[in-house]
Amino acid sequence: MVVDDEWPALEQMRELLLRCEGVSSVQIYDNPREAFKAAAEVKPDILFLDIQMPELSGLAFAEKLLPFSPDTDIVFVTAYRNYAVEAFELSAVDYLLKPVDPPRLHKAWTKILSKRTLPGNSEQPDAAARFQFLGGYELTGPHGAVKWSTHKAEELFAYLWIHRQGSVSVILNDVFTPWNYEKGKQYLHTTVYQIRKTLKKAALDSKIELIFDRENYRLESRGIASDIEKFQDAATLALQNSNLGKLHEASSLYAGDLLQPLDSLWVYPARDKYRRLYLKLMEQLTLGLMQTGRHYEAEEYAVRLVELEPLEESYSLQLISIYFEIGKPLRAQRRFTQFREAYLAETGDELPDWFLDVYKRLGK
């Protein structure tokens, strides 16, 4: 099927496609809305879409069609080399520039045929999905590691997984900040299309659905739990009953800060949320070990707390008290000196009197 609002372009594409190997019929439409109704019903094998069309752009067309016809391969056709072409080059099967060059069309057609006849495409998935967000960012599907077409698609998926939903305006503000509203919205729809294509290719589309409803995107997953859900559930249960074994198990699930490779502003509040939960686990675990007289074990977790929050007074005092308790006064003094120097360098002030008073009492 070919969709273009310019009739001469349609006639040219039909003539060129009928010369290609394996083409039995070519349907052409100059009205994108009529074309969409037909495509949703017929589910064409291959769809050539003009990007710039009135009423319904090729980008919006592709996004709306995917839930109805996920197996349709899409080739975008455009007269402009703009950012949309760059964005679609990896997510669509191919793209063509107007006026369409016959050798270039033949190359695109050959690419499509080879994709559809690759050995192994019909193999059934044989591995479970695994989503890692803590300490890194890696998604694994039934066919192995998920390969994203663009970094923005990878980031938007992480955003939607963590927030589960968001209005177009909020997502644009958080994830597509540098763009003006109209271009940003087009880029957003482009990126959503890339995500859906990636999930389909990774055999995850039956487990993860990205729904667009009333200017709001919502991500729903079925039967898949990422490491952040597992960590949060385990941490909540452990903090409720204060069982040392459960606290240890839950803390071991924290592999590092959320989405460490990403440096976008929206990541920081979410990252802090899980980090704070981990700190609470470590606090209770350290305190529980100290209360049961297991100071040598508590030392390991107290050191970790100081490494995570080097300027937190209570963490340094706790570690100092442990050192005194297990007969390591020199380590306690060294810890005090290190904290005092770090505090002075960061704040420009000397340690407060209350801190010095507690330290003196611990030393006695």
Image (cartoon, rainbow, N blue to C red):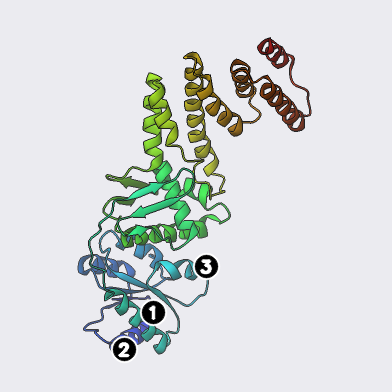
* Element on which disc 3 rests: helix
Task: Decide: is 313 above or below 136.
Answer: above
Q: Is residue 217 visible?
A: no
For label 2, count other residues whose C-alpha is less than 10 Å away and answer few (under 14), some (14-19) or many (20+).
Answer: few
Q: Where's residue 53, x and y in %?
A: 41, 70
Relative placement, left or right, of 236 versus 43 is: right
* Element on which disc 2 rests: helix
Question: Foreground mark, 1 or 2?
Answer: 2
Q: Which quadrant of the view contains residue 64?
A: bottom left
Relative placement, left or right, of 196 versus 44 is: right
- Name the residue beneath numbered marker 2: 15
Question: Foreground mark, 1 or 3?
Answer: 3
Q: Amino acid at mark 2?
A: Glu
For label 1, count other residues whose C-alpha is less than 10 Å away and answer few (under 14), some (14-19) or many (20+).
Answer: few
Gap in angstroms between the C-alphas marked 1 and 3? 22 Å
Instruction: Say which label, 1 or 3, has the lower sequence index.
Output: 1
Q: Amino acid at mark 3?
A: Tyr
Gap in angstroms between the C-alphas marked 1 and 2? 15 Å
- Name the residue beneath numbered marker 1: 6
The quadrant of the image that shows the N terminus is bottom left
Relative placement, left or right, of 51 versus 224 is: right
Q: Where's residue 40, x and y in %?
A: 24, 65
User: Is 321 in front, or is 267?
Assistant: 321
- Name the residue beneath numbered marker 3: 83
User: Is 114 in front, or is 197?
Assistant: 114
Q: Where's residue 276, x and y in %?
A: 51, 30
Gap in angstroms between the C-alphas marked 2 and 3? 29 Å
